[in-house]
Amino acid sequence: NDLDKLKDRPPVITIMGHVDHGKTTLLDYIRKSKVAASEAGGITQGIGAYKVQVPIDGKPLPCVFLDTPGHEAFGAMRARGASVTDIAVIVVAADDGIRPQTNEAIAHAKAAAVPIIVAINKACQLDMSALIDKDGANPERVMQELSSIGLMPEDWGGDVPIVQISALKGENIDDLLETIMLVAELQELKANPDGSAKGTVIEAGLDKSKGPFATFMVQNGTLRRGDIVVCGEAFGKVRALFDDAGKRVEVATPSIPVQVIGLNNVSIAGDDFEVVHSLDAARE
Ligand code: GTP
Ligand code: NA
Ligand code: MG
């Protein structure tokens, strides 16, 4: 019975929203990293995929976070991020409110039929006195804007969890993570780690040192070094696998993003991949 083979898998959480509303800063706080500071022009231009151990009640639970760009040019990446996720976290800056790519991100999440959590960012006292703009935008106003587009806050009797945070100061991030884990728990996310891997290519391109790469997210089965994969027009033998920290690994299990080296073509972002039994089969 295939149902017997289903095992819990980590939730995939995609962070989306308008440009500069603080998505990368939020993940930097969660991951204790400094990605935002090294981005050209302060703009995210690709999908970042990270495994994080979230401490809940003192116990670390694995989660996978995807960071997406907010710039309007990268709509395809937002759509891709929404299509592989279990939960969408929409980041809205309290001083800027709902903007075009906020609406676009919400539309992608709705199209993917995934639960939405809203993080109202730049919402600590210090932020509010420094950032409050001429229109008087503030967290309360963002909540009004959300309800006017059909996202009714839980606090107002609706079903959308809303958490006010400061990504920069690290305020209320615990609340946000707890909310995410509660929503994830209700989804009872499972996959079968046995058998050959299938999944989606979330990013692909040229790495400075490793050359052509693709970031895979396995949805079922386990991907192994040496496997032969086909995705879109591309195929190849998996020569090396790297985790999100750049460390060589031998396998990737469901939900876990992994960088794959060995494909003959990297214009495959968004395609599905699968493992086949031989290079001849792959060529065909
Ligand atoms: P894109 O990926 O390019 O769409 O931007 P982003 O949403 O990832 O925003 P990013 O993390 O690059 O942050 C944009 C700016 O907002 C940076 O200058 C951050 O330091 C600032 N910022 C982020 N969070 C906060 C916050 O909580 N408070 C304040 N005051 N500034 C913040
Ligand atoms: Na930015
Ligand atoms: Mg960013």
Image (tube, rainbow, N blue to C red):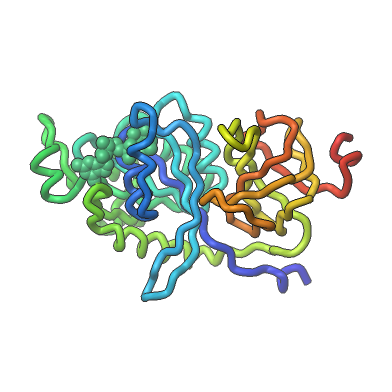
Taking the image in four quarters, ligand 3 sits in the one at top left
- On the rendered image, what quadrant is the N terminus found in? bottom right
Q: Position of residue 222 (x, y in %)?
A: 71, 58
Q: How many marks?
A: 0
Q: Is residue 6 above or below residue 80?
A: below
Q: Nearer the viewer, residue 103 or 268?
A: 268
Q: Is residue 1 visible?
A: yes
Picture quadrant where residue 6 is located: bottom right
Q: Is residue 144 visible?
A: no
Picture quadrant where residue 130 is located: top left
Picture quadrant where residue 102 is located: top left
Q: Residue at x 69, y 47 (%)?
A: 240
Q: Residue furthest right?
A: 280
Q: Position of residue 22 (x, y in %)?
A: 31, 41
- On the rendered image, what quadrant is the C terminus found in? top right
Q: Residue at x 78, y 37 (%)?
A: 235
Q: Residue at x 25, y 54 (%)?
A: 170
* Left or right placement of residue 91 versus residue 165 in this view: right
Q: Position of residue 103 (x, y in %)?
A: 37, 35
